Image (cartoon, grey):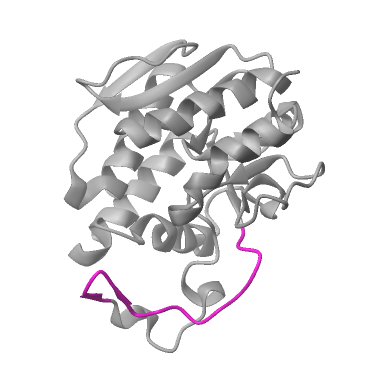
Amino acid sequence: MKNIAFVSIGKESHYCANLLIKSIKKFNKIDKIIQISNQEDDKLQNVDFKVGYKFKNSTFMINRLESQIKTIEKFGPTIFLDSDMLVNCNLIELENKLSKYDLIFTKRRKNFYINDKFNNIYYPEFTNKTAYEVMPFNGGFLAVNNLLAIKELLDIYKSLPERFKYWYGDQVAQNKIFNLQKYKILVLDNKYNFNVKNINQFDKNICIFHFKGRFKVLIKPFFEKYLKEN
């Protein structure tokens, strides 16, 4: 297994990232585990390299994509995970798939109508739209084998209205580049991006568990119950 990278900003994210790193190492022999953080952030233990970037709260999602491009330029094909994920398998099969594709996305498990307001920001593009119509792919997981593809993904993102620079833009851009049918993009199911909402949702067939938002509090007890080395 070559490269796995994650963005980690702030104390809570670093705490989760340390558990992510332990889970990666439990199942995989990795050439490089890469931390992407602000310049002033310390390099975490058991990380091979740290990529520094200047993140801003107002443009965090677009900065994340820019920092991922910087990582690809330096290290080559990479699997990007969120810091609030845990790995539960050997990812060599995923790496083999990536060698045959430009990008890999994961699809949402359920379709639903999207709320067109978020943090007092109105998104008219989402009014009466379902997730599968406008952003069927989950954020948090992105595997990249083609630098030109991720650069075009960034260009698409930058062309979106300003409100998407704060939130949702990454997933909207993913849908747009997929619909272009210009690149070889593999779409995986939620086996590689499974949202955990209950401590008892462990499944040995899931490769990557994701602890989003208020469910981040589950990451430590989940890790200790199912993934901690004996």
Q: Residue at x 19, y 31 (%)?
A: 54
Vertical relation: 184 (above or below) 32: below
Dominant secondary-structure state across the stretch colored magenta: loop
Q: Position of residue 162 (x, y in %)?
A: 18, 63
Q: Is residue 155 left or right of residue 40?
A: right
Q: Is residue 163 magenta?
A: no
Specify the segment rendered in magenta: 107-122
Q: Is residue 119 left or right of residue 71?
A: left
Q: Quadrant of the C terminus?
A: top right
Vertical relation: 227 (above or below) 51: below
Q: Residue at x 46, y 84 (%)?
A: 129
Q: Position of residue 136 (x, y in %)?
A: 55, 66
Q: Nearer the viewer, residue 50 or 177?
A: 50
* Residue 13 lies in quadrant: top left
Q: Position of residue 221 (x, y in %)?
A: 60, 38
* Residue 52 lies in quadrant: top left
Residue 140 visible: no
Q: Position of residue 200 (x, y in %)?
A: 72, 51
Q: Nearer the viewer, residue 58 or 224?
A: 224
Vertical relation: 215 (above or below) 116: above
Residue 71 visible: yes
Q: Nearer the viewer, residue 134 or 197?
A: 197
